């Protein structure tokens, strides 16, 4: 279940971290239609800062209009002003359209990700 209070705390912590990037796309009326977030961390095996896209979302009515591509390009341009080694993204294997999107935008499939969920008491 989604806890609004936990969200608010985590949201503020994320915004306060200078290694996190949040960009929003707006329509002509300045209403948000999409956003992208990336979190950066120093990885010793990569020799420096690595950013990982955490979220990329575009409102349904604005999909397939280049908004996602624009957000991705804006993120990459923003990161050019920072010292980093690479930009990564992970997606579910079932999201074939998402996989195609990232492949069409220069990302290569290089890893296999394993997840272990914390067991609750």
Image: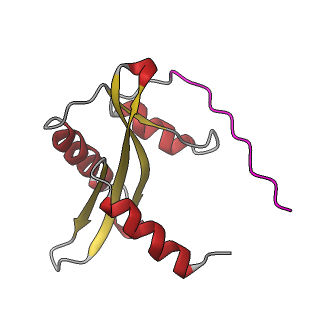
Whether residue 59 is visible here, answered yes or no, is: no
Q: Which residue lies at the image location 40% right of the left edge and 20% below the top edge? A: 46
Q: Residue at 32% of width from left, 55% of height from top? A: 17
Looking at this view, is 74 or 96 the one in front? 74
Q: Is residue 58 left or right of residue 92?
A: left
- How far across and down, in percent of the image, does residue 94 sit? 64, 43
Residue 11 located left or right of residue 66: right
The residue lying at 36 percent from left, 53 percent from top is: 37
Judge from the rendering whether residue 107 lies leftward or rightward of residue 19; answer left or right: right
| Quarter of the N terminus within the rendering | bottom right
Residue interval drawn in magenta: 110-121
- State left or right for residue 77 relative to residue 53: left
Q: Is residue 12 above or below residue 120?
A: below
Number of labels in the image equals 0
Residue 7 vs 44, above or below: the answer is: below
Q: Quadrant of the C terminus?
A: bottom right
Find residue 77 and report its horizontal and vertical position in percent.
16, 40
Q: Taking 96 as reference, is 8 above or below it? A: below
Residue at x-position 62% and y-position 32%: 113
- Coordinates of residue 27 in the picture (x, y in percent): 21, 71
Q: Position of residue 107 (x, y in %)?
A: 39, 29
- What's the colour scheme? secondary structure
């Amino acid at each position: 279940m989604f806890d609004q209070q936990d969200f608010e705390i985590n949201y503020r912590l994320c915004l306060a971290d200078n290694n996190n990037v949040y960009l929003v796309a707006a329509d002509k009326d300045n209403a948000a239609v999409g956003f992208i977030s990336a979190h950066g961390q120093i990885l010793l095996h990569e020799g420096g800062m690595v950013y990982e896209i955490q979220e990329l979302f575009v409102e349904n009515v604005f999909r397939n209009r280049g908004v996602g591509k624009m957000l991705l390009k804006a993120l990459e341009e923003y990161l050019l002003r920072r010292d980093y080694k690479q930009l990564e993204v992970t997606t579910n294997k079932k999201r074939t359209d998402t996989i195609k999107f990232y492949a069409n935008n220069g990302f290569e499939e290089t890893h296999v990700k394993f997840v272990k969920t914390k067991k609750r008491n």
